[in-house]
Amino acid sequence: MNHRATSWVPGAGRADGDFPIENLPWGIAERPDRPGEPRAMVAIGDAALDVAEAAGFGMLEALPPRVLAALRMPTLNAFMGLGEGDWRTAREHVRGLLTAGDRRSIEGHARRDVVLVPRDSLAMRVPAEIGDYTDFYASEHHATNVGSMFRPNQPLMPNWKHLPVGYHGRASSIVVDGTPVRRPCGQTVQSDDGPPSFGPSRLLDHELEMGFFFGGAGNPMGTRIRVDHAAEHLFGCVIVNDWSARDVQKWEYQPLGPFNAKNFCTTVSPWVVTMDALRPFRVPGPVRREGDPAVLDYLRWNDDFVVDVRLEVLVSSAGMRASGMAPTRISIGSFRDMYWSMSQMLAHHTSTGCPMRPGDLLASGTISGPTKESRGCMLERTWRGTEPVTLGDGTERRFLQDGDEVTIRGWCERDGHARIGFGECRGTILPAE
């Protein structure tokens, strides 16, 4: 017998929807009648629950004062800093408000339509004030593909299967879904030895990634987070598009790695899907094959997991959108294909004693799979531009052009469980200035 809870909120029961009662992701948004007042929201069906407004009407009075205080803040940092127990308590209470037949349900409340806001009316914001942003390089398929383009005899560097490789990104240029992306300028070269010229990047690319927010009490400087405790600090996940200027990257990345090629814009989806919501979609992992080196003890956890999130990348030209043409899907993959787990990334990040703070964002790096269709960026998908993809309007793409809109979607599905999704992570490319 199916005892699945149902919500009375419109759109929450759609089989192909992203935000059923089983999801309840957190976000920060401004509502049209409260401009300039970002506040915590929870997505449900076609609506969002305004948490601050609900608290004002006494709908959340059962929550501990520290939780209520955190949820009244204009970012999720304070809430992220509370820890698993408080996250779960708040989520379960909100779930009761929105569940049909629950004793806490606000379906018949006189202020119901004041606390529930149409989602499409909201101006979404980056959900946390991100103090630090680190981007990893955790997909073996991606690293092997890219490495084979530039180092055919040694696609993976000797360290790659021993540690999660990453670099520190630029938190100030993280933007939320729908924010336009300005084509960057930079130094590029025609040959490997130069000389360089300065101008708009010609090889602009997207990167299909997942990100996760650090939560709970931060670790003091000089201390580590153990891999078997790392999951306690995973607040939730978002989709990430770490835009990249490949021609700028080619010239600058030796000897210290990415810099201006990736600091100009990173887009995140606005709704943070909690690890509790993702729990049914965990699978044991990551997988190691025969011949792979043993993982060092500080990265080994027998109960480690990856999450089976399906992800797709769609591209539409300006002409396609003007004519009402649907975007073209150019790749589809899964977050479960990663070589390094979220717990391993966090444990390695802190292994030197690096302190983490609530709201810090860590991203996976490009997610690619074993097939051509599962390659997560244009560099791979078109194999450095030698195998262009064709959009629905008949035009070809080797890399992204001005006016192109890139949309990334993610969702989880499993028999016996409701489908949950992440919404969209979109960006439209504007010409260089």
Image (cartoon, rainbow, N blue to C red):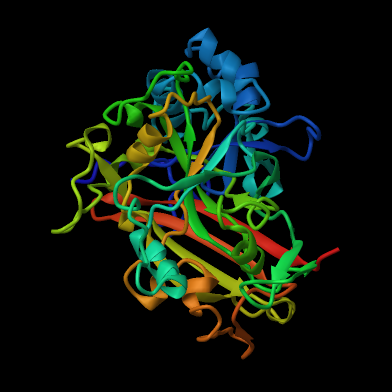
Residue at x-position 32% and y-position 58%: 337
Q: Nearer the viewer, residue 126 or 61?
A: 126
Residue at x-position 65% and y-position 22%: 73
Could you tell me residue 363's position as x and y percent?
A: 49, 46
Q: Nearer the viewer, residue 146 or 126?
A: 146
Q: Is residue 237 above or below residue 353?
A: below
Residue at x-position 44% and y-position 28%: 91
Could you tell me residue 344's position as x and y percent?
A: 33, 39
Farthest residue in the right direction?
433
**Res 425 quadrant in image:** bottom right
Q: Is residue 78 left or right of residue 21?
A: right
Could you tell me residue 76's position as x and y percent?
A: 58, 28
Q: Is residue 232 above or below residue 371?
A: above
Farthest residue in the left direction?
290
Farthest residue in the bottom direction?
394
Could you tell me residue 104's position as x and y percent?
A: 44, 23
- Would you say residue 19 is visible in this rendering? no
Looking at the rendered image, the quarter that the N terminus falls into is top left
Q: Is residue 166 above or below residue 215?
A: below
Residue at x-position 55% and y-position 54%: 255
